[in-house]
Amino acid sequence: MKVRVLVSLKPGILDPQGKAVEQGLHGFGFQVEQVRIGRLIELELPAADRAEAQVRAQAMCDKLLVNPVMEKASIEVL
Amino acid sequence: MRVAIPTFPGSNCDHDALHACGEVMGWDARSVWHRSEALPDGTELVIIPGGFSYGDYLRCGAIAALSPIMADIRRFADQGGLVVGICNGFQILCEAQMLPGALLPNESLRFIHKDVHLRLERAGLAFTGAMAAGQILRIPIAHAEGNYTLDQAGLEALEARGGVVFRYCSAQGDIHADFTPNGAANGIAGIINERGNVLGMMPHPERAVEEVTGGTDGLWLFRSIEGMLSKV
């Protein structure tokens, strides 16, 4: 089963990379109020159903994929 | 004095640490491969060295924190053993949740390598016993992710328990954001766990142990540890 994990920085965590991209966009004349950059992780994992896939992906987030000090994740079973 | 220095794929300060401990301090310095499941018998100190373990994939230190040797280093620390994580080693200790917080990319997004000044905030620790309170050290940094962060409540708790060991400062010891090279919260350069036996720091004391390479202020750390362990 395919699962997408979207890892993003928690609100309030400084994102210098997003800031740099924001300034780049301003440089091109685009209007944008904020840019935050995260990470997309695509998993292919064995699971009997969507609920099991969700549970397994959550366990992976808790163990390795996400650092709760600075990041949060949303899990999407495809 | 037996010190174990783990090497992960991508470590690059392991030999600096071996040199500082072995050649300069005259200790019995042992290199340990990351897949080893146990530290050498009689290990008294572990130094987790700097570098780019696992290419900094996912997050700095995240993969190394799960390696077999880290399980034994955690056991060693749980029994009161002394552990120092330098630079990537600090990142690994945070990822292993042996120290609070995380190291974000530098505010400038640049890799920064230069000498910085540090003010000692906690004298009397196993790692700082030979130093005086407020002592200023000049030690190099070399990192792209040294921007220490922790949620507000955690930061207040860390400060309240005296968990901050080193803070970036001016040559005179003034603390100000201008002297913090990477944007770290409260100018934090190094912290210690509650028990006082696990230290993490971004600057590289092992690179400041001989005049020929620009200074010897890093020796204060090694001499403190030696002084502490010789009393046991």
Image (spheres, coloured by chain):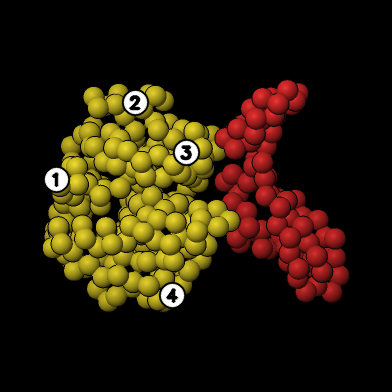
Chain colours: A red, B yellow
Residue occupied by mark 2: B175
Residue occupied by mark 3: B110
The residue depicted at 36 percent of the width and 62 percent of the height is B77
Sooner in the amino-acid sequence: mark 4 or mark 2: 4
**x then y, percent, for residue B14:** 32, 61
Pointer 1 and pointer 3 on the same chain:
yes
The residue depicted at 86 percent of the width and 70 percent of the height is A49
Measure the C-alpha gap from mark 1 to mark 4: 35 Å
Of residues B24 and B91, the one drawn nearer to the viewer in this rendering: B24
Parent chain of label 4: B
* Quadrant position of the N terminus of chain B in the picture: bottom left
Residue occupied by mark 1: B211
Residue occupied by mark 4: B35
What amino acid type should be assigned to the residue bearing mark 2?
Ile
Sooner in the amino-acid sequence: mark 4 or mark 3: 4
**x then y, percent, for residue A45:** 75, 70
Measure the C-alpha gap from mark 4 to mark 3: 32 Å
Pointer 1 and pointer 2 on the same chain:
yes
Measure the C-alpha gap from mark 2 to mark 3: 22 Å
